[in-house]
Image: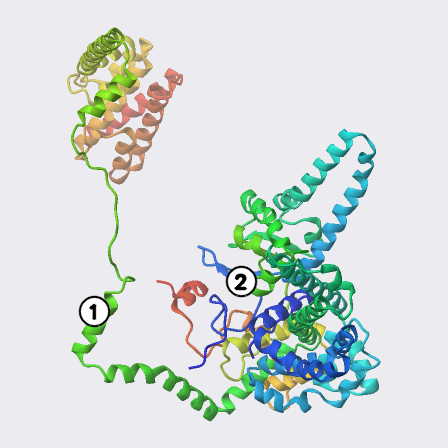
Amino acid sequence: MQEPQPQPADQPAAGAIDTLRRFETPEGVEIALRLAGPVPRALAFAIDFAIRAGLYLLLLPLAGLAGVGVGLLLLALFLLEWLYPVLFELRSGATPGKRAMGLLVVHADGTPVGPSASLLRNLLRAADFLPVLYGLGLAAMLADRDFRRLGDLAAGTLVIHRDAPPLPAALPVHPPLPPPAPLDLATQQAVLAFAERSRTLSPARQAELAALAGLTTAPGADPVAALLGIANWISRGNTADAAAPLPAHADVEDPAQAP
Amino acid sequence: MTISARPRSPWESMDLGFALARTWLGRLWLCWWLAAAPVALLSLPVLHQRPDLWLLLLWWCKPAFEAVTLFWLSRAVFGEQPGLGATARSLPQALPPRLWPQLLWRRIGMGRSFSMPVTLLEAPRGAARRQRLQVLGTGAAGWLTLVCVHLEAILWLSGVLLLAFLVPAGLPAPDLQAAFTETGSAPYWAANLLVVLAMSVVAPFYVAAGFALYLGRRTELEAWDLELAFRRRHAAPRGPRARAIAAAMLLTALLLPGTGAAAAMTPAEAKARIEAILAQPDFGGTREERVWVYVGDDSASSADDDGATALPAWLIQGLATLAKWVLVIATAWALIVLTLHLLREFGGPRRRGRRPTSTGPPGPVAQTSAPAEPLPANVPAAVHELLAARDVRGALGLLYRAQVAQLRARGLELADSATESECLRAARARTEPQALTRLERTVRLWQAVAYGHQPVDTDSVAALTRASDSASADDGHG
């Protein structure tokens, strides 16, 4: 028997490869964390490194003083090297470099990172740095399915994309049209997404996609208009689903049916 | 379709590419070597004197190696995963002639990871290719190349240093300087091999990230994900036979091992097997617990302890006496407090009952429900007397009682404990409006005096009395 492809356990049933980690809150709300991979994280590190290098350059004149100056310089070096990330992560969840790249450090359950986790993941930079320039951390990141380096594994943290995906644009207003046949969930979502994104598509491409969808109600009708009409129809809460709606769902949507 | 297509930012597209490469790292790595190994081995006899040139050749040919990786990846993304042999057979397809420009004048360029999918998979030519790339735009492909070069360098340096660190202390230390400078030396060859290894490890991630960038760009510009969704919907109803076959295969795969095993076993065998499985340590077993058990007084050791921590006998005696008297006094005090409390509790109601009669005005309870005070025969006269004596409260109380008595006389069931509002509510149901308004006004005034302690002028009470006179006169007539 062939071994199935290694798939993350908490992926949706389709098993599609994705960088989302989904959690369901006790209220039944599903949240998805968008994991950040090595490329944005490496660039964020480079920005942070440049900032720290600039600070070191500013502090360099201290060395001109006698022993006290060197001592102060060493102290500043120690504090900057070890506490720079912790300070920023506790303040806003991200160092300036991470913020510039739109990244955020969170606990594995999506809550803001706390002092112990932040300290742990940053103290373990020493382990990630081995043998040179984060070689071990890079290897761990490439091998782990959540792109965690050793510090993240130990502290139970994730680095995710902070910036929210752009809100879906409002549907173009169109007289609602019921679809010619019941649609499954994926098609309903695709029709809605088509309506939301239709403004970013060229008219030719819109016509092409609409013809491909093949959801015209009457022969000779404009397929794009038909698709937009169906999207408006679905967005008003009409279920075009082939399967019967869940009873609980019906209760929520139609209070008149509730006893 | 093995990836979830949705609009993503370029950075997220790259992350998706890294996730793809991680999922199929072994296969993609082998695909890279499928093209790289022949080049590396065939060039060795010529270049065995010059490992630097050998490395340059391999580096220069990277687009060709990556083309094979991309070929396999582009099929795997759509659910078809050709084996190594099948990939080797389709090498001519994976390395078409239009790859040559990539290996010649387009070799130096930062956007290779992004332009390769366009060139190889879409295969536009000349001006069409240029225009297509212009439309798609390379986006963040340059950053990807920059980062991946550094990742390669880090992996290579880490490998070299790791090997150097892990050489045991007894052996001669590896010559790190030779590894970087002395062309042709053994350490140099080792370092070169590590470079190729690092290239081969990073290449799948680089190719997959570039491919994901390309897919992300097409999703953004052409709603490629929607096209897929619509096509899938279109295909699903048209292929009932394919679906049936797939479902049947799935079912057979699902059912065959189970039914076969069940048919081959008698209940006794099954029971034996169940018991064998239940006997495994996963299902229960032994548990070790540690508890303290009293084993008797060890007099020798306790004597030793006493000797070790002995206090002066007089001190112990004194402390014990002190503790005893503290306990006795505390007990006596507690007894006294308890007795006083009980006395107060039992004596309480009597004292509380006496206090209002002696200090305050008569309470409403005593007024309305006292059966000891009978109503005077002529209520209006009594009220006028009380008013003349400036006892408004007494007058109102008397009026109210008289009206309640009237209500009772008319057959209204009123409990002794009924409040004014309850009387009013009961009266509302049974009484004619005129008598009701009088009762209402009486109650309002009575409540204002008795509970609100508000001053009420005697005239309004006198008016009530007149109304009462007429009402009683009506009663008399009726």
Query: Mark 2 falls within which chain?
Result: A
Secondary structure category for the residue under label 2: strand
Residue B164 visible, this angle: yes
Q: Is residue B72 above or below residue B300?
A: below
Identify the chain of the residue marked 1, using the numbered disc in the image. B
**Viewer-proximal residue among B290 and B217:** B290
Q: Residues within 10 Å of mark 1 (few under 14, many from 20)?
A: few
**Is residue B209 shown left or right of residue A124?**
right
Mark 2 vs mark 1, CA separation in Å: 40 Å
Name which quarter of the figure residue B21 lies in.
bottom right
Q: Secondary structure at mark 1?
A: helix
Contact? badges 2 and 1 (CB < 8 Å): no
- Choose mark 2 or mark 1, whichever is in front: 1
At horizontal 24% and vertical 41% (from top left) the residue drawn is B291
Question: Where's residue B79, x and y in %?
Answer: 55, 82
Within 10 Å of the Cα at label 2, are there few (<14), some (14-19), or many (20+) other Cα atoms? some
Please state the horizontal and vertical placement of residue B104, each as a whole percent of the image: 82, 82
> As displayed, is residue B75 above or below residue A80?
below
In the rendered structure, which amino acid carries the disc numbered 1?
Glu
Residue denoted by label 2: A21
Name the mark on residue B275: 1
Mark 2 and mark 1 on one chain: no
User: How far from the left and from the top, in percent, is residue A80?
Assistant: 69, 41
Q: Quadrant of residue B257?
A: bottom left
Please state, as top left, top right, bottom left or bottom right, where the N terminus of chain A lies in the image. bottom left
Work out whether A213 lies above or below B164: below
Q: Tag 2: residue type?
A: Arg
Identified at 64% across, 83% down, the residue is: B34
Nearest to the observer: residue B315 or residue B126: B315
Q: Residue at x 45, y 77 (%)?
A: A3
Q: Which residue: 79% across, 83% down?
A: B129
Q: Is residue A231 visible?
A: no
